[in-house]
Every structure is written in structure tokens, then in C-alpha cells.
Amino acid sequence: MPTSKENMYGDHISHQFNDDLSSLKNDFLKMGGLVEQQTTDAVNALIDGDGHAADEIRARDKVVDRMEMDLDEEATRLIARRQPAARDLRFVISVIKMVADLERVGDEAKKIAKFALTLAEEGQAPRGYVEVRHIANHVTAMLHDALDAFSRLDAEQALRIMKEDKRVDEEYQAAARTLLTFMMEDTRNISRCMAVMWVLRALERVGDHACNIAENVIYMVEGEDVRHTPVEEAEKVVGR
């Protein structure tokens, strides 16, 4: 059975208002599913050396951009038509912010696909793919969990995602040091390893955007803005 928090944005007298909020939520989750898949596909294209798949991913970025514009328009119409107050306004504003994060995840996937295409054309797999796969699995899991936390309005799960962000930063720094060692050992590796470094940076940014979405989930549920707040302070908000 759904929890009371899952119902907190669907208990209005107006059935149409409930439908509008539900539509906004569902459309956001569709966009989230698309950018999650884009990221996974881009990493697979890189590791498999599949230039054709990388090209397709870059082309699909236009769909993500269109969804961002449509969701912004949908949210703006809902504000103008329904003039939501307090809790509902918090939900709509948060969705607008999170849509921007999803669009940027799509941009990062496009960057990864660009480097996948370049490296596939070079035809020689560089070092660092183990690190790429590891960090990619971590940040895509964070993004998936952030979308799930939004769907269920689960502030505790959102808090767990915030805690993962530091681990991703540490993994990124360790991977960068490993690639730097490869470049120092053989200068012929520099160009290819730099491309992988940019891929790792893009993945680290995906983790940042997943964390931003998690922060907005906490804001929706608890009514407290935990951006730029230490995790320890966010714990107090969620644990009240």
C-alpha cells in the first residue's frame, strides 16, 4: 500500500488538480528514465568501441532537450492555472529544478558518447576502462535511486544518496591518479588517457546531479532546503 507521503501530492478535492500533478510526476520520471539509459548506453558504447551507438546517443540528446522544454512548460501552466500554495508549490518548483539536473545528465551522456566516438575511431582501447565501468555503475545507481526516492517521496533514501556523493569524489580522484601514472609511464598514452579523464569527470558530474535531485526530494518531503548543507545537518532534518 502507498505510504501517506506518497499520497501527499494527490489528495485534493479537485480530481483534475490531482491528475495535473500526477502527469507532471510521470513525465519527469519518463525523462529520468531516458537520461539514465543514455548514460548507461554511452558508457557501453565507450567500452565496446561502438562508434555507431555513440553517434545514436548524441542524436537522441535532442529528445532530452525537447522533454526539458515540455516539462518546463507543463509546470509553468500548472502554476498559472492552479496557483498552488505551500506544499504543492514546493513540489512544482522542485520538479523544475530537477528537470534542469536531468537535462545536464543528458549533456554529460552526450559528452561521453563524443569521446566514445573519438576513441573508437582511434581503434585502440586506452587504459582506465575498469575505473570508468566502476564509477559509471556507482553514479547510475545513484541516479536510479534518486528517481525512485522522488517517485516514493522517500527522504531517507534521498539522504543515503547524498552520503554517496563523497565516495564518488574519492573514486574519481583515485581513478585520475591511476590515469596520470599511465601517462607518465608512456607519453603515447596521453591523448587517449586525457579522453578517459574527461569521461570520468562527466560521470562524477552525473553523481553530483543525482545528489541535487536527492536534495530536492528532501525539500519536497520535509520543507527544508538542504542544499549547501553538510550531510550531518541534513540527517537532523530527515530524522526529525
Image (cartoon, rainbow, N blue to C red):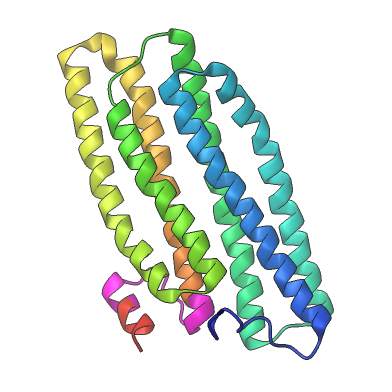
In the figure, is residue 39 to the left or right of 10? left
Q: Which residues are magenta?
A: 219-234
Question: Which one is in front, 207 or 3?
Answer: 3
Residue 65 in percent (x, y) is at: 69, 44
Q: Quadrant of the rendered structure where residue 162 is?
A: bottom left
Q: Is residue 123 found left or right of 189 in the rendered image? A: right
The image shows residue 195, relative to residue 71, as above or below, that is above
Which quadrant, please, contains the N terminus?
bottom right
In the visual, does 185 lie left or right of 167? left
In this view, the residue in front, 230 or 207, is: 207
Q: Residue 123: image x %, image y %?
A: 42, 8
Q: Residue at x 59, y 50 (%)?
A: 33
- Residue 105, placed above or below residue 124: below
Name which residue lies at 72% across and 83% down. 84
**Considering the image in quadrants, where does the C terminus appear?**
bottom left
Task: Find residue 89 and report its image quarter.
Answer: bottom right
